[in-house]
Image: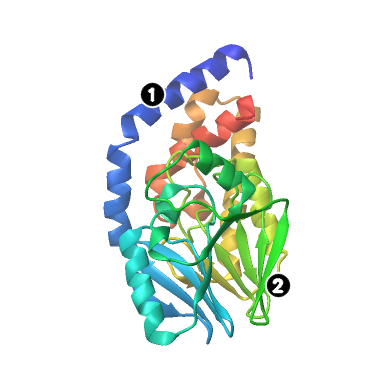
Amino acid sequence: MNQKIILGIIISVIILISAISLSFYSLYLEEDDKTNLTQNLSGLIKVTDDIYSFGSNGYFSLIMITDEGIIIVDPVNQQHSENMLDAIKEISDKPIKYLIYSHNHWDHIAGGKVFEDTTVLSHEDAHDWLVENPNSNVRTVDETWKGNTTTITLGGDVLELYQFGKSHGKGMTVFYIPQEKIVFLVDILTPHRLPFTIMPDFTPKGWENTLMQVEELDYDITMYGHKNATGTPQEVTEIREYLQDLRTEIILMMNDGVNPMNIPSTIQLEKYEDFEFYDEWLEMNTWRVMLEMGMGW
C-alpha cells in the first residue's frame, strides 16, 4: 500500500472514531440488553461445585472456592463487588485470599477496595500501566507476575495464568483451571458476536495468536467476562476463524483490484451474518484490521 492510501485510511478511521465514539457506545449498551436473551444472567451462577460466575449488567467475575480460601478474578465496580461479596458469604465462610485483575482496563477492575485483607495480583504489564494511569476506584496491585505463565495453588487446587502476548489491553491474562477443565476469558471473546466496533485497544494479529493458544488447552467449559456466564470451546474457534477469515477476505479483495478505501463498506462474510452486530460492526472491524495490515498498528 502506498503512502497516499495509508494516509487516506488513517484520516478515514480518525473521522469514523470521532463520529461514533460516544453515540455507538450508548447503542452497544442498549442493544446488549436486547440481544443477550439466552444468558442474560445476574447474581451468583454455579458452574461446578467449587467454581462460580457472578454477573451484573453484562459483566462477569470468576469465583474459585478452595479448602484454604477463595480466589476472585475481576471486581468490575464497587456495586458489583459489594453484591458479589454478599453472595459469597451465603455459600462459603472461607477468606478471600486473592483478587486478580485480568488486564488493565478500569471497567473490569474497579471496586477492589471492597475486599479487605486480600492480596491483589496482576501481570506486571497491567500493573505498570495502572501506576502511570491511576484511578481512585481501582485498588493498588500488591503483587505482580511476569512472563508468559504462573500458577497459584491454594487448598490443593490449581489456577494457571497465561499471558500469550499482545491481544487486548495490557497484561491480558487467560485463566485456566485444569482440575475442572475450565477457561475464563475476559474481553478477548464475546460468543457469537463480532468484535466491538473498531476493536479498541486490540492487536488483531496477536489476538488471533492468543485464541489459537487457548484452543490448545484441555478444557470443556469456557467462562466469559461479557454477555454469557459460560460457553463451549467451539465458540473460541468461531471467533478465531472470524478474525482469520476477515484478514483473508481483505487480502483477496486487494488482490482483485478493489480500491482499499471501498473494501470496508463492501466486504461480506456470509458465514458470520447471524453473529450479533454483523451489520453494524463489520465495516469498523475491517478498518481496524486494514490499519494493522497497512501500518503494523
Residue in front for this viewpoint, 172 or 129: 129
Asked if residue 77 is positioned above or below residue 83 in the image, the reply reads above
The residue that mark 1 highlights is 15
Please identify the quarter of the rendering in which residue 169 is found: top right
Quarter of the image containing the N terminus? top right
Asked if residue 287 is positioned above or below residue 5 in the image, the reply reads below
Quarter of the image containing the C terminus? top right
Say what secondary structure mark 1 lies in: helix
Q: Position of residue 11 (x, y in %)?
A: 45, 19
Q: Residues within 10 Å of mark 1 (few under 14, many from 20)?
A: few
Asked if residue 147 is positioned above or below residue 224 in the image, the reply reads above
Nearest-to-viewer mark from 1 and 2: 2
Q: Residue at x 47, y 38 (%)?
A: 133
Q: CA distance from mark 1 to mark 2?
A: 43 Å
Residue in front for this viewpoint, 158 or 53: 158
Say what secondary structure mark 2 lies in: loop
The residue that mark 2 highlights is 218
